[in-house]
Amino acid sequence: MNESHKPEQKDTLTFKDFKTDYIPVWCKGCGDFGVLASLTKACANLGLRTENTSIISGIGCSSRLPAYTKTYGFHTIHGRALPVATGLRVARPDLAIFVVSGDGDGLSIGGNHFLHACRRNVDLTMIVMDNEVYGMTKGQASPTTPCDWEKSKLTPQGTHIDPINSIALALSAGATFVARSFSNNPKQLQEIIEQAHNHKGFAFIQVLSPCVTFVPEQKNWKNIVEDSTKPMASNRYQALSMLGDLGNFETGIFLKENKHEFFEKNAKHTNPLLDQSNNNDQAIINNFLTEFEV
Amino acid sequence: MLYKTLNMAIVGSGGDGVISIANSIIKYGASQGYYGVTSRASGPQIRGGEVAGYVRLSTNIIGTPARRQHLVVAFNVNDIKVFKAELVMREETTLIYDNSKGDIPDDFILTAGNTIGIPFNKIAKSIPGGRVNMIALGVIASILKMKLDVLHQQITTQFINKGENIVNSSIKCLNAGYEFLDSDSNKSDNTNTNKTTYQLESVNPNNTHKHILISGNEASGLGALKAGIRFVAAYPITPATEVLEWIAPKIKELGGSLVQAEDELASIGMVIGASFGGIPSLTATSGPGLSLMQEFIGLSVTAEVPATIINVMRGGPSTGIPTKTEQSDLNSALFGAHGDNIKITVAPNSIEDCIHATQWAVYLAEELQTLSIVLSDQLLGQTIAVIDKPIFKDYKAQRKLYQENLKQTYNRYLITDDNISPMAIPAQKNGEYTATGLEHLENARPSSDPLNHRVQLGKRRDKIISYDYGDYAIDVKGSDDATTAFICFGSITNALYDAQNLLAHEQNTKIKVISIRLLSPLPLKLLHDQLKNISDIIVIEQNHMQQLYRYLKSFKLFDTKNHISIAEPGPLPLRGIDVVRLFNDTLQNNHKS
């Protein structure tokens, strides 16, 4: 590893300090490269330290991202990044935590965890790289695939199921920061990630991130994505009411709501591994045993 | 008559306060220096159905609930039918039933030697705020010759927070019940009040041990916190929920936290996340939950993130018999997750041991950076017992942590002498790495290199099998000259000790009982040593498919010896006499064949 990249030797870090020299498995032209760039730039611009940042993922193309960053990371199992990140958040209120996921990982197999992370309003930033397809398994329909997409061998006649609107789902489940961006719009994406990180509570960002290999028509997204002109809502009912008019390629922050976050009061968490001499704990536990005396 | 041990059952419908009576009796017994156990059984309904509370009091320490009862109190005689398999009445039994609504139905076959009708409901109605359970407690108190003033004090303490009226009406009911059988005015033609008393022998005054009243589930929770658990994720499931409910307020006092998860996958996921963050973490569940956790178990093993699961076994498979006991999750614990993975499995063999074994399991998970499973069961978990106040063992979570070193590149999965790699936790400088379930190199980067795969598989196996677990891995009871051994694990150990005594005294047969606490990795050397002079081995377990027997056989532990399997599924707790019967039957069948 390049010695000059050692973060502790510098006061301010650049996005390069947040990247490893590991070459991503992603195909040429994959939107996820843009997300990696914007995320590392946001981290640097937020003044985060690599050692105080954790990036948690599940399984899929997008979930490979943590290994390409020089932060702490956990590449967990399919669909389950959010529970792991929730446990880490509760145990370690001091860390900056990002969850990176895809449309299959985050909204299909991990759908239940998504609902409950939203309603807990747990202080996490979740980035879902949405390419409307399972890329790692070579092109099957995901929960955000259009119902008439006929290019999957599993569903050659199309799914005939309406795709999930992840923005609507996040809003109705209780996420307090909801936004959409585009991997090809690095400046906007970086800014939204920064705002999401600064938001107290669960922040959800749907990032349109084209899969040029299995859905090459997504190359056209750059021509249809546009900045939203809708005003940012401050409560979810307001945000939900404008959903009907919101196009699927309109990007921006749709909701920023102040709501009590999960476990905000438990700002400190004891750690017996680091504090082996905590005799007070031992006295409390001995007292637990005494409470059983008859 | 004086007894060393008294067994009683109280049967009623939800709302009769059956469990409250059982708890009052055991509390009283404990305050008088007696040992005891109490357990509950219920019919299929969650609330409002039939409930039975069992109490066993004794001058000596006991572990197994009884089936044959000295005293049975039924608020509705028909409710007894629900529990006929586990509630046995014989010549020595007194049955007391509520005759407010009439006598015992004709189709009811009476097996109790003595039957007494008492109009609990009528008496309750005659006292403002009167409750049948307090009257029944009074009746039981007079039959057991309990000290009324002690009971008064106990009831007052119990209800003082509910107000003076409740205390007063409770004491009135208690007194009414206590006096009922001795009052001549209650003797009429249709009320048999032929009172038999059952009194316990005095306790040994030299026994000055402090006693505690605790359930196995509470004991497991206590052991977990003692070991250093400061994060718990919880999803409710019978019969494990009490572990989590006990921990919930306690862990807060210690500056830790408990989160209720959306399902079992989330609870083990949260545990692994918190542990990745450097906090010793645990969850508790039962069979179906353990099945759901299997993929995460593989991640914990492969990514080498410590975690502990307390699995309180119930009747399986599938939903099975959720409120009753069985030892049928052994295979699931040992072999559940996919791929080659080895982890720690520990089985507590008494209520007290739920404290120590859980503490040990947490310690081992942290020490070896892997996953450990505590195999408790419904019988251990939900039985409340009076036991000697235990002394905690020293097991305290400690992890081989990375020491910050800015000059060297950190390798998370470094091959070391003991195969345990220093683990960095977030916020440690220059320790940044990505934990992963993908096969990885020493530096944590994913790799499908065949040689590296072997190296990492070997690392994860060897750190576990070459560790010195010490003598606590098994319990052995019995004389050295015994040539027959019982091998078992978990809650049935106590019944095997009882059987060992019975066989020694009644059949002059010497048995060595080996209870395996460390089920994975199996302490082969200790077992071989213990089996050296043994010619006949009987593996006894409470499941249908000989899970322990087949597992032990795969290690060729007893290929050169006579060996038989007794595999008796739940849901009824196995008692000493059951084991003796099964042992004799098996021997006979063996001779025939």
Image: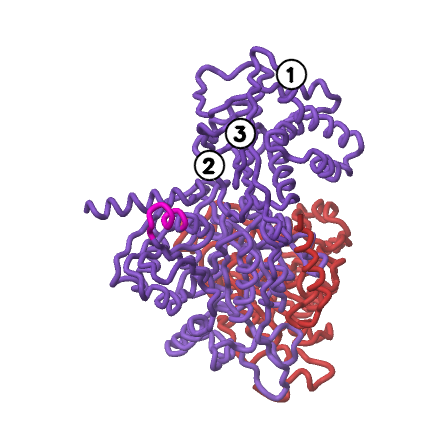
Chain colours: A red, B purple
Of the numbered discs in the image, which one, if any, rests on residue B72? 3
Q: Residue A103, position in %: x, y?
A: 55, 57
Q: Is residue A158 among the parts visible in the rendering? A: no
Mark whose residue sits in front, 3 or 1: 1
| Residue located farthest toward the top when viewing the structure as drawn | B189
Residue B287 position (above or below residue B116): below
> Disc 3 marks which amino acid?
Val
Question: Which is nearer the N-term, disc 1 or disc 2?
Answer: 2
Q: Nearer the viewer, residue A229 or B358?
A: B358
Question: Which is nearer the N-term, disc 3 or disc 1?
Answer: 3
- Residue B477 is left or right of residue B566, and the answer is right
Residue at mark 3 to residue at mark 1: CA–CA distance:
23 Å
Of the numbered discs in the image, which one, if any, rests on residue B67? 2
Q: Residue A81, position in %: x, y?
A: 57, 61
Q: Residue A10, position in %: x, y?
A: 71, 85
Mark 2 nearby-residue class (10 Å; few <14, some 14–19, many ≥20): some
Task: Tell whether label 1 touches label 3 (CB within 8 Å).
Answer: no
Which residue is disc 1 drawn over? B184
Question: Which is nearer the N-term, disc 2 or disc 3?
Answer: 2
Chain for disc number 1: B
Mark 1 nearby-residue class (10 Å; few <14, some 14–19, many ≥20): few
Q: Is residue B485 among the parts visible in the rendering? A: yes
**Region in magenta:** B501-509
Chain for disc number 3: B
Q: Which of B211 and B559 is in front in this view?
A: B211
- Whether callout 3 and callout 1 share a subunit is answered yes
Residue at mark 2 to residue at mark 3: CA–CA distance:
11 Å
Q: What residue sits 63% from the left and 53% below the top?
A: B208
Label 3 secondary element: strand
Q: Report which quarter residue B524 is drawn in.
A: bottom left
Q: Report which quarter residue A195 is drawn in.
A: bottom right
